[in-house]
Image (spheres, helix red, strand yellow):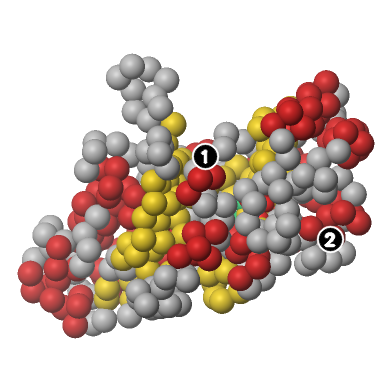
Amino acid sequence: MKDLYRLLPEEMEELMIELGQPRYRADQILYSLYYKFPEGISEIKQLPKTFREALVDKGFTIGSTKEIHRIESKDKETTKVLLGLKDETPIESVLMQYPPKKIFGHPRSTICVSTQVGCAMGCVFCATGQMGFDRNMKAEEIVGQVIHFAKILDAKNQHVTNIVFMGMGEPLANYSETVRAVKLLTHPRGFGIGQRNITISTIGIISGIDRLADENLQIGLAISLHAPNDKLRQWLVPTAGPNSVKDLINAGQRYFLKTGRRVTFEYALIEDVNDSREIATDLAVLLKNNGSHVNLIPLNPTAGDFKRPIRKNVLEFERILYNSGVNCTVRVEKGSEISAACGQLRTDVLGKYNNKGNQN
Ligand code: SAH
Ligand code: SF4
């Protein structure tokens, strides 16, 4: 099976030439894929019927995703779906909407995509980490998640404004498919979203961060730090290996110097684990003066005994960073009541579905 969503516009043109078609067929297909969201090749009405049939005969396909399960937050701003991939593997994607700033404006619509089925990094507080690693996702499967929501939004005359690679899996452990997905999503003849509207979140694979910095892309980078010292970080991220907190901060600095994009450090705040005043002060010492930004994520409790700190402690942690001159925000808690922490929905729902997404 060769999925048309996998091909970059230049590759689509090469394919058309190979198939003895005029070059403009590539744009007809691309227009259909990214503006009409067809579910099968037979729905690409811009193409002559005989050519559509020839594509199907040659084994080409369109990787439409099947929605297995959907939950919406009470305020309707967060929608989390379990999608079945072509091989029926269930994965998670989320749409987060933020009301428009202007009366007649469009909402900000951010899609959170998964890049792997499961994750091998094993972070102790993360539901995906606890389910283990199944397989890498293909670029077309990553793009397919965006297309799924783009189609839903399009029907409401809305569109995708931001994409964050913060769902299941470690994007930089699936480097080439992640970067191919970014190129498909940002190519002006592909999905066409601005590079600056994409953020990749990584647990801190340093070789991947340096490689990404050399891609000549303008995408944002978020590094999941979670601790100001190696001992604590290695407990929370057991696969952190020899990468020290200092190494990660230096890698973030190199990314900033190469791309001009400021790096965000994500910090999942866990009660009595990494939320004390002393730890906040250590973090502030580490990050002040390097222009980075900290995003505090109060824990969405999943597996284990980890708890979310009370609001007062979250604000105190933020205040200490802020007073030391560290740029800091607390992530708006969206969708916690619908298991919006990565990997949580799959874990919750898989009791009801077998691992091929069929209802038991
Ligand atoms: N693997 C990448 C991207 C996916 S996780 C990474 O770890 O960065 C995206 C973010 O969600 C990470 O910062 C991660 O630490 C955070 N996260 C995972 N589980 C969480 C939970 N239960 N509560 C709050 N944040 C969580
Ligand atoms: Fe993997 Fe990220 Fe979860 Fe860690 S936090 S287990 S890297 S998905």
The type of residue carrying mark 1 is: Lys
Mark 2 lies on a secondary structure that is helix
Question: Residue at the spot x=27%, y=76% of the render?
Answer: 60
**Could you tell me residue 171's position as x and y percent?**
60, 60
Mark 1 lies on a secondary structure that is loop
**Could you tell me residue 317's position as x and y percent?**
79, 31
User: Left or right: 252 with respect to 63?
Assistant: right
Q: Is residue 164 above or below residue 107?
A: below
**Could you tell me residue 25's position as x and y percent?**
20, 61
User: Left or right: 197 with respect to 152?
Assistant: right
Q: Is residue 268 visible?
A: no
Please state, as top left, top right, bottom left or bottom right, where the C terminus lies in the image: bottom left
> Distance between the Cα atoms at labels 1 and 2?
27 Å
Question: What residue does disc 1 label?
Answer: 334
| Residue 1 in which image quadrant | bottom left
Image mark for residue 277: none
